[in-house]
Each structure stands twice: as C-alpha cells, then as structure tokens.
Image: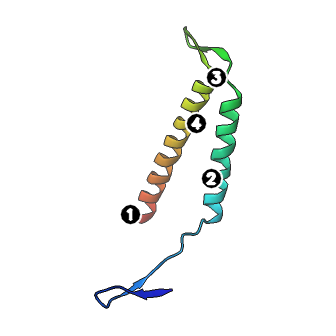
Amino acid sequence: MSASDPRGATVTRRRFRLGPGQIVGLVVVVLAIIFIVQNRTEVKVNLFTATLTAPLWLLLTIMTAVGVVVGVLLRWRTGKTRRG
C-alpha cells in the first residue's frame, strides 16, 4: 500500500506482523505472568548458609528476569560469533 506525502514522495506503509517465534514468546510471557500472580505465599529460600523469606511471586519474577537476561546474552553472543 503506497500513499503520497505532501512533498510528492511515495511513502510505503508496512504492516506489523508477528512471527511464530514471537507468538510463542508472548504466550510464554503471559503464562509466566499468570503463574507468578497465582503464587503469592511467603516461602523460605536457603542459599548456601543464608535463609531468605520472601513472597514467592517476587522470587519467581526475579528468576524470570534472570532467565530473560541469560537468553538475551546468549542470543547476542551467538549472533556476534555468526557474523564475525
């Protein structure tokens, strides 16, 4: 679909489409959010010698964020090695 702008140039409009990977990613994010919201109890977490008491939703959110960061870093690293 093309349209003319006031200066006479042709403007091409692109439609935004989600690919299969993006759709799966969105579904996983929605499921993670639902899972996190449903788990709001206080839990004890033992990390080596320290014991931490925190809401489960907070711990799940932190671990989800850690997973996203690791995924982004791994994708960035593999993309960098493929190009160079």
Q: Earlier in the sequence, mark 3 or mark 1?
A: 3
Q: Secondary structure at mark 3?
A: helix
Q: Position of residue 39 (x, y in %)?
A: 70, 26
Establish if 76 lies above or below 83: above
Q: Earlier in the sequence, mark 1 or mark 2?
A: 2
Q: CA distance from mark 1 to mark 2?
A: 27 Å
Looking at the picture, which amino acid does disc 3 mark?
Leu
Q: Earlier in the sequence, mark 2 or mark 4?
A: 2
Q: Secondary structure at mark 2?
A: helix
The residue at 41%/58% (across/down) is 80
Q: Earlier in the sequence, mark 2 or mark 3?
A: 2
- Identify the residue under disc 4: 64
Q: Check the picture and name the quadrant holding the C terminus.
A: bottom left
Establish if 52 lies above or below 38: above
**Is disc 2 surrounded by few (<14), some (14 to 19) or many (20+) residues within 10 Å?**
few
Q: Nearer the viewer, residue 76 or 35?
A: 35
- Identify the residue under disc 3: 56
- Identify the residue under disc 1: 84
Q: Is residue 65 left or right of residue 56?
A: left
Establish if 17 lies above or below 6: above
Q: Position of residue 44 (x, y in %)?
A: 64, 12
Nearest-to-viewer mark from 4 and 1: 4
Looking at the picture, which amino acid does disc 4 mark?
Thr
Q: Is residue 31 left or right of residue 6?
A: right
- Identify the residue under disc 2: 25
Q: CA distance from mark 4 to mark 1?
A: 30 Å
